[in-house]
Amino acid sequence: MIRHVLESINGVGIFPIISLIVFFLIFTGVTVWVVTMPRRKVRHMAELPLEDDSVTKGE
């Protein structure tokens, strides 16, 4: 039933293409952002779960 409803909508075939393009652009953007991130920041973020609360609050 859903298939027949979707087939009756004009131009519905463009939505999967748009979704794929949006996903690819976001995935590519995040990948470029992570690869170009400074190593110092990556190291700092990796150590955050291991730090005490007193160290992160500056006490």
Image: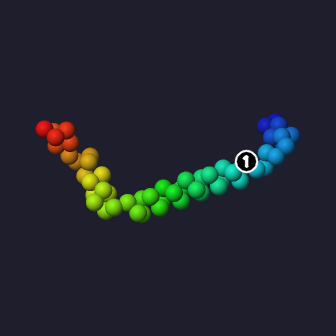
Please name the residue shown 80% across and 40% down the image: 6
Please name the residue shown 33% across and 61% down the image: 38
Please name the residue shown 58% across and 56% down the image: 25
The residue beneath circle 1 is 15
* Placement of the N terminus among the 4 image quadrants: top right
Please name the residue shown 60% across and 53% down the image: 23
Q: How many marks?
A: 1
Above or below, 11 against 31 in this view is above
Tell me, yes or no, if residue 21 can be seen here. Answer: yes
Give how far across and how far down residue 40 sits, in percent: 28, 60
Above or below, 48 against 41 in this view is above
Give how far across and how far down residue 43 sits, in percent: 28, 58
The image quarter containing residue 58 is top left
Q: Please name whichever residue, 19 or 41, is drawn nearer the observer in this view of the structure.
A: 41
The image quarter containing residue 34 is bottom left
Left/right of residue 7 with respect to residue 34 in the rendered view: right
Q: Please name whichever residue, 8 or 57, is drawn nearer the observer in this view of the structure.
A: 57
Q: Check the image and tell me how it is coloured.
A: rainbow
Left/right of residue 26 with respect to residue 37 in the rendered view: right
Disc 1 residue type (three-letter): Phe
* Placement of the C terminus among the 4 image quadrants: top left
Left/right of residue 26 with respect to residue 33 in the rendered view: right
Q: Label 1's element?
A: helix
